[in-house]
Image: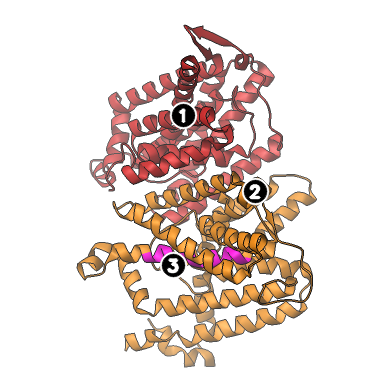
Amino acid sequence: MLILWGNVLVSGILMGLVYGMIALGLTIIFGVIRIVNFAHGAMVVLGLYVGYFAGAWWGIPTIVAAVSAGALLFVFGHSLETSVVKRFVTRPHHIQFILFIGISLVLSGAQLIAFGPDPRPSISHLSFETIALGPIRLDLARLQAAIVAAVMILALAGFLKYSTFGRFIRAAADNRLGGLMVGLPIPKIYAITFGIGAACAGVAGALISPLFDAQPFLAVDFTLLAFVTVIVGGLGSFVGALVGGLTIGLTEAVAALLFAPSLKSALSYGLLMIVLIARPRGFFGAKET
Amino acid sequence: MQKKRDALPDRGAVLASLAAFSVLSGLGGVLNPYLISLLTIVFLFTFIGQSWSIMLGLGGQLSIGHALFVGIGAYSVAVLNIRYGLSPWFGLVVGMALAATVGAALAWLSFRFEVRGIYFALLTIAAAEFARVVLSGWEFVGAMQGLFFPAQSGPNSLWMLRGDARFYYFVALAAVFLGISVTALIRQSFLGYVWRAMRDDEEASRALGVRTFLHKIVIVSFSGAWAAVGGGLLALVQGSVFPDSIMGMGISVDILVGPVVGGLGTAFGPLVGTLITLPLDHLASAIGNKFGIPGLNNVAYGFALIAAVWLLPDGIVPVMVNLAKSVTRFSWFGYLQMEQVKK
């Protein structure tokens, strides 16, 4: 029994790291640009397809696919920001919501046209392999996804904390007007931030390609998952996204063990309600600016 | 002087709504069954859109999970009617009460610690999804298999709200114009002024003695009850309720797209916008099906939404009004209206 619990908790933590990465993309875009990317799930699915095709067609390992998905989605996010999103930065939230719903529909529709509605099950050999760590058995695909996600998150944290451009981004998030006053290249910062956010979604999507069947309709689920994660953790907080991801990962794992697997999302929403009652801004939510 | 003019809806709006009402009633007699059923859905979404619009346009609270209230209304009507054989009117009343309570609870939860703006919007969508997932697993209300109203037999009945397509057309049309009137009345009531003051500057209105916390709860609750009525009617028209088709995120999106494209804060915005967006969605689906390309409809509709918020920042109705003003400026009608044309 104890071993079963240990297994479930560990796999929950591993998934939680990937969820944290998805949420990180959302939270970084919101923290800097003050826009909620409702097309986030569609971007995750885009990464999922990159991972799937890289594995199915060319036999590229998931890690390499994840890096290329990240690069691809960065370029995509960057060009989306410079061509469309920047015009909507100062518009009201409901207008932004419709814009991103439109973008999400276009993305999902394009995926549907290109790849069809049928789920594409992963053929990665990783999904069947496990390694034993004492009494705990680790699913190799999950372990790899979690490790890569953790490394990427650390790299991103280091970039934001120590590089000059990372400092620019944090300054822009802290005070946009002040940033403009001292001559920060705000449009460039916004474009790159949006690119980073999209890249997080893409990397996470490619990483879970051995675990999820690629399918355009997953977009809504991933968007909602990312929302729940960032609200639990606190919108706009880097640490919050991670803690939120781990919490949701653990909750889902425990829910699948205690109740029916289909109820796992209900429990996440239930957790969200409890968090909102106890800490309305999430664990690490910033004060509203 | 200004106050006096505001006290009544302006003549143009009253005339326009009467004209629109008679045209649409006339159309109800002549259109073919497909258009009748399409317009019925359009009207119901307009009606629900009005409730959304009043919450954001007057109260300043953005909801992106309005399907929550729609679903509560729909399930109240369906459960009471199908399980207990009660008239849908009871279901509508119960749905309103439930939705008002849920709305108040939701608002209380979030506004109590100043959770507002986009945080509140995210909370609404989370609540809607939570309710959807719970309903999907609840056997008593049909779970994923949904609930079906018994097939229509016998004459149209206003008491049981059962009838043919044309019957529902007129029910939905009546709802839309009830919605337009209620919106106009609230705008000019005490509450309307308080809500707009609160929307424009919450701190200032609180300093003037407005109990903003209470008013925000009232407005979410009111809007929720209104949307529940629309949800109940929608369930009757569709003849069935499923968690995904009545409470999914797609419904929340459909509800708010119409009013925004039409023009937020205008009396006719929800109607004009929904009259354009919903048929456009259907048209895109038809085109996608015709060419056998699933997904084409999503791409077309998505681009249409992006174009709408890009090109028409304030919506269609303000553009139409300006156009009408510039055309009628020197005409006889414009002469009559001159006092109102000037700013």
Q: Residue extending furthest front?
A: B84
Query: What is the distance, in whole Å, between disc 3 and disc 1 at their CAs?
Result: 37 Å
Q: Which chain is red?
A: A
Q: Which residue is mark 2?
A: B298
- Is residue B22 part of the magenta span, yes or no? no
Q: Main secondary structure of the magenta part?
A: helix
Instruction: Say if labels 2 and 1 share a chain.
Output: no
Q: Which residues are magenta?
A: B218-233
- Is residue B230 part of the magenta span, yes or no? yes
Which residue is depicted at the point 63% across and 72% down?
Answer: B172
Q: Residues within 10 Å of mark 1 (few under 14, many from 20)?
A: many
Which residue is depicted at the point 36% across and 36% down?
Answer: A233
> What is the chain identity of the residue bearing mark 1?
A
Query: What is the distance, in whole Å, between disc 2 and disc 1 at their CAs?
Result: 31 Å
Query: What is the distance, in whole Å, between disc 2 and disc 3 at their CAs?
Result: 33 Å
SS for tag 3?
helix
Mark 2, mark 3: which one is toward the viewer?
3
- Note whether residue B255 is visible: yes
Please name the amino acid that badge 3 sits on. Answer: Phe
Relative depth, front residue between B290 and A7 = A7
Which residue is depicted at the point 59% across and 15% down?
Answer: A61
Q: Which residue is mark 1?
A: A249
Please name the amino acid that badge 1 sits on. Answer: Gly
